[in-house]
Image (tube, helix red, strand yellow):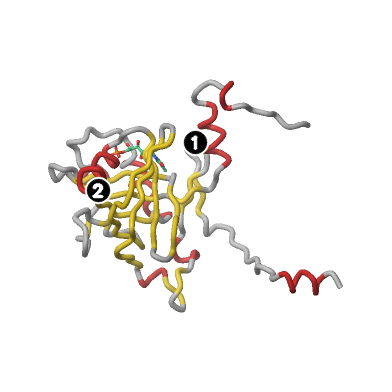
Amino acid sequence: MGFVEYRPSELATKDPYYLLTSLVVPRPIAWVSTVSGDGVPNLAPHSYFNVISSDPPIVHFTSTGVKDTLTNCRATGEFVVNFVGRDLVEEMNVTAANFPPTESEWEWAGLASERSSLVAPHRVARAKAAFECKVSDIVSKGNGNMVFGDVLVMYVDESVLRDGRVDPRLLHPVGRMGGATYTDAAAELFDLKRPSYQDILDSRQ
Ligand SMILES: Cc1cc2nc3c(=O)[nH]c(=O)nc-3n(C[C@H](O)[C@H](O)[C@H](O)COP(=O)(O)O)c2cc1C
């Protein structure tokens, strides 16, 4: 068995997408809550999501093309990232349907919301954690529009904390694999202590 070498420029348009999204895995899911310029609440999952900076805390997610979430971020400059646990996957999936901008995904998914402290978009009441964010930048590359957010407030439900730290066994974070496949990241956990250079030298003696 050898390697297959793919050149994105020679592939059909959708193929790099399948390779990227089945290899860059598992991806965390930002379940992004926004409000439109007209005040319509919106909620949609984004697995192109990660941390940019911890001091100060900055996150980003990417809208592929122009979707309601992006339009709302441009209009209002605010969003809330809700974290998706194993217990919320069905509701999260409903909110990924292509609702028209006038429809609120919250109602279709049967989700209750909680007011945020500093921003207008609400958070998902049942989400075990959420970040309130203020848009700092929107950068477009290819078909992606990256929305950067300064994290103003971090909510964590006490039920997922152990000794003051988030315990993945309690959070059951869900990661997206390729296509319609997901992983419960708490299903198999292992610890790996990071060595110092000295540890490695000592272990070779
Ligand atoms: C788990 C999951 C992850 C997704 N990740 C993204 C993403 O990172 N970027 C994106 O543009 N769409 C993503 N989608 C698709 C959007 O959620 C979908 O297009 C949604 O309808 C957009 O809603 P909006 O128009 O209200 O923003 C994802 C869908 C699912 C189910």
Q: Residue at the location (50% across, 41% down)? A: 181
Identify the secondary structure beneath mark 1.
Answer: loop
Q: Is residue 92 above or below residue 185?
A: above
Toward which corner of the image does residue 153 lie, by quadrant? Answer: bottom left
What amino acid is at disc 1?
Gly
Closer to the camera in the image, 46 or 56: 56
Work out which quarter of the rendered image holds the N terminus and state it: top right
Residue behind mark 1: 179
**Residue 23 in picture, x, y percent from top left:** 58, 40
Q: Could you say which is closer to the camera, residue 22 or residue 195?
A: 195
| Circle 2 residues within 10 Å: few <14, some 14–19, many ≥20 | many
94 left or right, relative to 164: left
Residue 5 image position (x, y, % from top left): 68, 29
Q: Name the side, left or right, on which 189 lies relative to 152.
A: right
> Callout 2, which amino acid?
Thr
Residue annotated with mark 2: 34
Label 2 element class: strand
Mark toward the start of the polypeptide (1 vs 2): 2
Q: Tag on residue 136? A: none
Please tell me which residue is depicted at 45% across the width and 75% down the height of the picture.
162
Compared to residue 193, the image places residue 126 above or below, namely: above
Q: In this rendering, which labeled residue sits more in front, label 1 or label 2?
A: 2
Q: Specify whether 189 is left or right of 182.
A: right
Residue at disc 2, CB closer than 8 Å to ligand 1 = yes
Quick check: 133 above or below 181? below
